[in-house]
Amino acid sequence: METKNSIFICESSYLSFSTTAGTDVIDITRPVADKVADSGIAEGQVLVFTPGSTAALTTIEYESGVVRDLIEAIERIAPKDMEYRHDARWGDGNGYAHVRSALLGPSLAVPITNGRLALGTWQQIVLIDFDNRPRKRQVIVQASGLKSR
Ligand code: ZN
């Protein structure tokens, strides 16, 4: 890798998505890839992060069968119809959403190699919103790395 003719840059950009009261799994690969392409970074990484404690980011093969399988697996791990201390305390009924979000995590880092996201062919980046009311979700896309001068 050439470094003499490269500069290090770090660029933050923002995406936003409207979600419903159910569990939404949104494929955000294309807009993230577009931000990375716009940055001109050849080698580096992109950090994708969603502020908020009832959403998460991960990767999955974005096909309806496995997306459904994931939603059902999460339902078994942190069922919606259980008693949560959070709900007793705040009364907002989304204790399950906070637990699910904490388990999956709010961020994801993906390497950028040869100017592209190093994702597998059947690996998409997904934003998952667990909350029990419609939300406007923000996703921060922070790309950093080497760019040709
Ligand atoms: Zn809450």
Image (cartoon, rainbow, N blue to C red):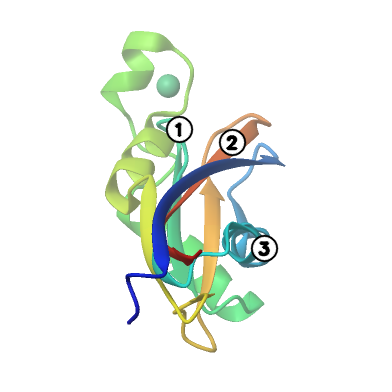
- Asked if the residue under mark 3 is in contact with the one under mark 1, i.e. CB atoms within 8 Å, the reply is no
- Asked if the residue under mark 3 is in contact with the one under mark 2, i.e. CB atoms within 8 Å, the reply is no
Q: Is residue 128 left or right of residue 73?
A: right
Task: Identify the element where label 1 is drawn.
Answer: loop
Task: Identify the element where label 2 is drawn.
Answer: strand
The amino acid marked with disc number 2 is Gln
Q: Is residue 90 left or right of residue 68?
A: left
Task: Identify the element where label 3 is drawn.
Answer: helix
Mark 2 nearby-residue class (10 Å; few <14, some 14–19, many ≥20): some
53 or 84: which is nearer to us? Answer: 53
- Give the image location of residue 32, x and y in percent: 59, 59
Name the quarter showing ligand 1: top left
The amino acid marked with disc number 1 is Pro
**Residue drawn 37% across the image and 34% down it:** 98
133 or 52: which is nearer to us? Answer: 52
**Label 1 to label 2, Cα distance in Å?**
7 Å
Taking the image as drawn, is residue 2 in sight?
yes
**Label 2 to label 3, Cα distance in Å?**
16 Å
Q: Is residue 15 left or right of residue 9?
A: right
Question: Residue reaching furthest front?
Answer: 4
For mark 3, what is the residue? 34
Label placed on residue 138: 2
114 or 130: which is nearer to us? Answer: 114
- Asked if the residue under mark 2 is in contact with the one under mark 1, i.e. CB atoms within 8 Å, the reply is yes
